[in-house]
Image: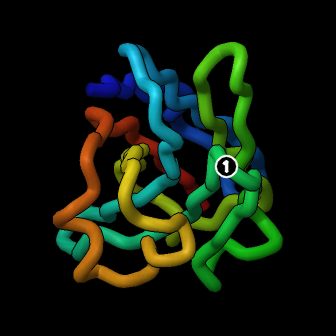
Amino acid sequence: QVQLVESGGGLVQAGGSLRLSCAASGRTFSSYAMGWFRQAPGKEREFVASISWGDGGTFYADSVQGRFTASRDNAKKTVYLQMNSLKPEDTAVYYCAADRTYYGSSWFDPLVWEYLEVWGQGTLVTVSS
């Protein structure tokens, strides 16, 4: 089973940028889709982005499209979330996840989330105005 460790969260001013990292460890023979979710105080968890290890395809929530970019480094077994033009509404705890069954494109569906295999511990992103 894969274990995920997230880092890179912090405090940033609106309009600024931040880069989150999610490092995976553990032996894996199957292809994992990986991605990011976030949860703001008092709100439900929200899909942010996903990326396929198989074809490298990426998918984004409408709220972050054009501002956030998900990428991967196979050698480091790490996925990244580059966040630009940050807004106060982006303030949340950001979680990375990995799964061998569901396509990254299906991560938009909340019904899928409970079946995702591995989750990270989360990292807090605070955007001030």
Is the residue 129 above or below the residue 78 in the image? below
Give the image's coloring scheme.
Answer: rainbow
Estimate the x, y position of residue 106 in percent, counting from the top left. 46, 77
Judged left or right of residue 78, residue 115 is: left
Is the residue 30 above or below the residue 17 in the image? above
Is the residue 2 above or below the residue 120 in the image? above
Q: Nearer the viewer, residue 128 or 97?
A: 97
How crowded pointer 1 is (Cα within 10 Å; few <14, some 14-19, many 20+) is rated as few
The residue labelled by disc 1 is 54
Estimate the x, y position of residue 37 in percent, counting from the top left. 41, 59
Quadrant in the picture for residue 11? top right
Q: Nearer the viewer, residue 118 or 27?
A: 27
Total numbered badges shown on the rendered structure: 1
Q: Nearer the viewer, residue 3 or 123?
A: 3
Q: Quadrant of the C terminus?
A: bottom right
Q: Quadrant of the N terminus?
A: top left
Quadrant in the picture for residue 110? bottom left
Q: Report the residue at 28% width, 42% height from top.
A: 119
Estimate the x, y position of residue 5 in percent, counting from the top left. 39, 23
Q: Report the residue at 57% width, 59% height from top.
A: 50
Q: Report the residue at 71% width, 36% height from top.
A: 72
Q: Residue furthest front?
A: 29
Check disc 1 and give the amino acid type.
Gly
Is the residue 26 above or below the residue 117 in the image? above
For mark 1, give the secondary structure.
Answer: loop
